[in-house]
């Protein structure tokens, strides 16, 4: 039986390129993927190692992860600013003493919440 001639030599791979690709998979590893990917690309310019595609994919996914985290944070802040108080009150059933009760707008003290009708009932 003949020996296969096209074996892949894993010793020729750049370790940082592999780390970049592996850490880009998680959102928390995105900054590490960007850093190790850029360092790996610099090393690959001078060395004869392989793994350029891994470093490029790691950098691209890392930047995508960072951008999506920033975007989701901005969207969450906007939604929280716009609807946050309302969402806090509805999560507590609308009967929290810290929430403004929109069913009551009189000058006298707000009545006991247990005496108010539940939302959606007559």
Image: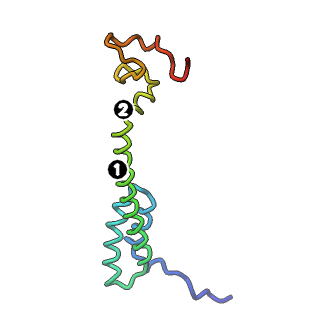
Q: Residues within 10 Å of mark 2 (few under 14, many from 20)?
A: few
The percent position of residue 110, horizontal first and vertical second, equals: 36, 13
Q: Are marks 1 and 2 in contact (CB under 8 Å)?
A: no
Quarter of the picture containing the C terminus is top right
Q: Which residue is mark 1?
A: 74
Residue 102: image tag = none
Q: Residue at x 40, y 72 (%)?
A: 17
Give the alpha-carbon distance from disc 1 to disc 2, as whole Å.
17 Å
- Image vertical order of residue 88 relative to residue 19, above or below: above
Image position of 121 with respect to 2: above or below: above
Q: Look at 65% across and 89% down and name the residue there.
A: 2
Residue 22: image location, x then y, percent: 44, 64
Describe the element under mark 2 as helix, strand or loop. Answer: helix
Q: Residues within 10 Å of mark 1 (few under 14, many from 20)?
A: few
Where on the picture, by quarter, is residue 34? bottom left
Protein image colouring: rainbow
Upstream in the sequence, badge 1 or badge 2? 1
Instruction: Give the position of the N terminus as an image quadrant.
Output: bottom right
Foreground residue among 36 and 79 = 79
Say above or below: 19 vs 114: below
Which residue was labeled with disc 2? Answer: 85
Which residue is painted at 40% across and 23% down in the image?
A: 102
At 31% from the left and 72% from the top, the residue drawn is: 39
Q: Camera-side residue: 93 or 49?
A: 93
The spot of residue 83 in percent (x, y) is 38, 37
Element under disc 1: helix
């Amino acid at each position: 039986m003949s020996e296969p001639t096209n074996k892949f030599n894993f010793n020729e791979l750049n370790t940082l390129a592999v780390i970049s690709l592996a850490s880009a998979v998680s959102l928390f590893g995105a900054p590490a993927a960007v850093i190790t990917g850029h360092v790996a690309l610099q090393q690959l310019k001078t060395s004869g190692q392989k793994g350029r595609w891994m470093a490029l994919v790691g950098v691209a996914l890392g930047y995508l992860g960072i951008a999506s985290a920033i975007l989701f944070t901005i969207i969450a802040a906007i939604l929280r600013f716009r609807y946050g108080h309302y969402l806090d009150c509805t999560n507590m059933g609308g009967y929290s003493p810290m929430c403004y009760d929109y069913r009551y707008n009189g000058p006298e003290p707000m009545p006991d919440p247990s005496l108010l009708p539940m939302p959606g009932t007559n």
